[in-house]
Amino acid sequence: MINISISTYDVRKGDTLESVAAELGISSEELKRYHNSYCDLKELIGYDLKNVRSILIPSADKIAELKKNKTLVSRNNELPSKYLFENFYAKQYEVKEHFEKPDAENLIIDYTVSVNIREIKGRGFIAEVKSSGFKKNDETPDDKISQLSIASMESIYPVSFIIPAQGRINGFYDHKEIAKKFKDKRPDLEDFFVGEVSQIYFDKFQNCLKDENFLLNQFRSTMMYQVLFLKMDWLHKNKPWEEELYLIQNSFPVKCLLEAECDHENSEYIETTIHGNITDEYCLQELLKGVKFSECNDEPAVGEINFRYKTNKQTKHLLEAEFDIVLMNEGEIYNTYKLILIAKKEEKRIKKFSTLAE
């Protein structure tokens, strides 16, 4: 066995560059590069160890550094690219949103979100998104406002967004098409939903669709869209960074300090956890109203944030995503929110596994 505390190894009969390097735990190329960097010109190693009497070997610290760098390179190769690609997303995700507030009944919303993404030359990607199958606390919503809201949204699906290669929603692919869809389907909706309340709701919904900036902010400030359409370099961060996030829907974004860590231990997937806190000093009422006050006497809102992403080591697909936040005001918990997205298995695969089970 080689004693790596010394700097020179005497070549023995049967030794090869590969065998010596293997005992050191480094590659033959790394050993050759190290030796040739410090040896005399007449002792340079070529293709083999012919006529080589001794090899200069790295110190224990240097070997540890080489192994660390090799591990980092290997682990980086297991991560998805820093740039979006067409197969990053599954076709469908099961979504569950938990809303908890002191002295109020907990609310759980379940639904399915479908994602169809394709690359367009010079503009990044188009992501067609559609949500369906809404349930509130395990029951299909039966109150009129919920039904009006779901029916109105379903009339404009799928909504097509522009997603740059770096990730995150950048805009609508065709805003006018969204408004046209609702206008064309409104007569059918009015045949089903009759009465003054429905007319007022449809009028307001149609007016909102006309305002592109307002509508875009509605989508971008929704936590599901922020979690799903992440910035791809989040999965590669190795030091703290500042990011603007919408913590309240239809409000304004606030600066948060985030820090990521990756767990590569599982053989099939990587789990990336991102922890963060609010750094902007806005009081809770500013966030809730979506208006920045000239002066606020309340203490700044405090938010503890966590993202979790699971990506497949082989395919680089997004398997699962989670987000949770505890929002506090004046030292008391204002609300707790959690979002979970889990990729649905494709029907063909499910059938295949069912057949095997039989």
Image: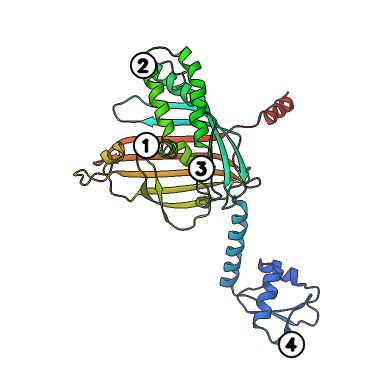
The image position of residue 188, as x and y in percent, is 50, 16
Residue type at mark 1: give it: Asn
Disc 4 is placed on an element classified as helix
**Where is residue 213 drawn, in percent x and y?**
41, 39
Q: Nearer the viewer, residue 113 or 262?
A: 113
Could you tell me residue 238's position as x and y percent? 49, 57
Q: Which mark is residue 42?
A: 4
Q: Residues within 10 Å of mark 1 (few under 14, many from 20)?
A: many
**Which residue was labeled with disc 3?**
229
Of callouts 3 and 4, which one flags the residue occurring earlier in the amino acid sequence? 4
As measured in the structure, the alpha-carbon distance from the residue carrying label 2 to the one carrying label 3 is 35 Å
Which part of the image, by quadrant, shows the C terminus?
top right
Tell me the element at label 1. Answer: loop
Q: Which residue is mark 2?
A: 197
**For the view shown, which residue lies furthest in the left direction?**
297
Residue at 52% over, 52% down: 233
Q: CA distance from mark 1 to mark 3?
A: 17 Å
Observer-nearest of 28 and 114? 114
Amino acid on which disc 2 is placed: Val
Residue 324 can be seen, yes or no = yes
Q: CA distance from mark 2 to mark 4?
A: 92 Å
Task: Evaluate if marks 2 and 4 touch, with contact meaning CB atoms under 8 Å apart.
Answer: no
Q: On screen, 156 above or below 198?
A: below
| Mark nearer the N terminus (1 vs 3) | 3
- Element type at mark 3: loop
* Residue at the disc numbered 1: 250
